[in-house]
């Protein structure tokens, strides 16, 4: 489990690079500092900056440190829907309202606790938001975890989501290129950040249009936190039921976002594999409750 702590520094003179200054004052390498700056874990005067930012005297630097505590993942006998099991990984059908990893506020009762009960060394290689349903991969050993994480980094893992978004998307298909950064006023949220955000790209294709919503197939080309939710909200078409990035009335029991398909290279066979999990009942019920546009 990880906790978030905050360390405050104040620049006593001008002219030094942000990453170099922090490395000289904290017990972390410059490469680690640079990586965390890019992740949005460093704020200068409440704003995100680049590693090469030149400090000014009096700049207030806040470093949000995610430190592991001394505990370990507690194995818990929690029901799991295992879609596919191999010697190297398992494919999970994650329901909505299921936290993936222990964190402050959710110390246990998570998907990882459930995996630890069934397997000796489960490793999460990616995550889904609590209210997002669908297909997830969990590695069963360090070698497999490293292999799949490398595939994510090299963009060899392909994911397809299904979503119901507010309003009518006019184009049959499109690409959203909007940089994303952490919201300095609410650290639980992300937002569009044109000057200091990280490159984020999402493609989509319309499946059906309704009087007040659109059913879309979504292809994330990058993997930023809350990426799909932020992108569609920024377009003015938030995902139905999204209480963080949408506006009431939500007209759905939870955010209507479902991880439908994932494909990657199997470590044992070296062949590309693909797993598809159809949307759950609450998603299908929301879909069937929309009035289709008559063409």
Image (cartoon, rainbow, N blue to C red):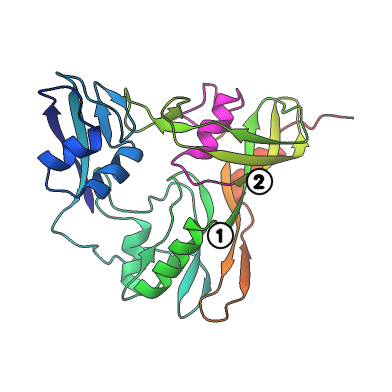
Of labels 1 and 2, earlier in sequence is 1
Residue found at x 12% / y 48%: 27
Residue found at x 35% / y 64%: 114
- Residue 141 pos. (x, y %): 36, 74
CA distance for labels 1 and 2: 26 Å
Q: How many numbered circles are shown?
A: 2
Is residue 225 covered in magenta?
yes
- Residue 117 pos. (x, y %): 31, 70
Q: Label 2's element? A: helix
Q: Which mark is residue 157?
A: 1
Q: Which mark is residue 209?
A: none
- 199 relative to 74 in the view: left or right: right
Does any portion of residue 289 appear in the rendered image?
Answer: no
Quarter of the picture holding the N terminus: bottom left
Residues 201 and 217: in front is 201
Does any portion of residue 146 appear in the rendered image?
Answer: yes
Residue found at x 42% / y 73%: 144
Which residue is identified by label 2?
284
- Residue 105 pos. (x, y %): 25, 43
Q: Nearer the viewer, mark 1 or mark 2?
A: 1
Q: Magenta part of the protein: which range?
A: 221-249
Characterize the local packing of mark 1: few (<14), some (14-19) or many (20 or more) Cα atoms within 10 angstroms. some
Q: Label 1's element? A: loop
Q: Quadrant of residue 69?
A: bottom left
Is residue 23 covered in magenta?
no
- Residue 242 pos. (x, y %): 51, 32
Compared with 247, 281 (above or below) is: below
Quarter of the picture holding the C terminus: top right
Residue found at x 52% / y 35%: 229
């Amino acid at each position: 489990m990880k906790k978030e702590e905050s360390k405050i520094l104040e620049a006593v003179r001008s002219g030094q690079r942000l990453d170099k200054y922090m490395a000289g004052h904290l017990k972390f390498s410059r490469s680690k500092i640079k990586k965390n700056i890019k992740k949005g874990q460093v704020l200068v005067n409440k704003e995100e900056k680049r590693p090469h930012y030149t400090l000014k005297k009096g700049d207030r630097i806040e470093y949000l440190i995610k430190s592991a505590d001394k505990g370990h993942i507690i194995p818990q006998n929690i029901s799991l829907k295992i879609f596919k099991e191999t010697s190297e990984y398992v494919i999970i059908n994650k329901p909505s309202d299921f936290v993936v990893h222990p964190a402050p506020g959710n110390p246990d009762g998570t998907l990882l606790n459930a995996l630890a009960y069934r397997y000796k060394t489960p490793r999460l290689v990616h995550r889904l938001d609590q209210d997002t349903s669908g297909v997830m991969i969990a590695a069963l050993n360090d070698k497999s975890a490293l292999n799949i994480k490398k595939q994510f980094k090299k963009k060899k893992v392909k994911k397809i989501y299904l979503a119901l978004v507010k309003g009518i998307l006019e184009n049959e298909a499109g690409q959203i290129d909007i940089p994303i950064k952490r919201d300095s006023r609410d650290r639980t949220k992300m937002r569009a950040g044109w000057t200091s955000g990280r490159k984020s790209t999402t493609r989509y294709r319309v499946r059906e249009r309704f009087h007040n919503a659109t059913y879309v197939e979504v292809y994330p080309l990058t993997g930023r936190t809350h990426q799909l939710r932020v992108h569609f909200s920024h377009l003015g078409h938030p995902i139905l039921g999204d209480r963080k990035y949408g506006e009431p009335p939500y007209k759905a029991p939870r955010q209507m976002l479902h991880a439908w398909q994932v494909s990657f290279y199997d470590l044992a066979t070296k062949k590309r594999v693909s797993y598809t999990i159809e949307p759950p009942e609450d998603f299908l019920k929301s879909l069937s409750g929309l009035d289709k546009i008559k063409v």
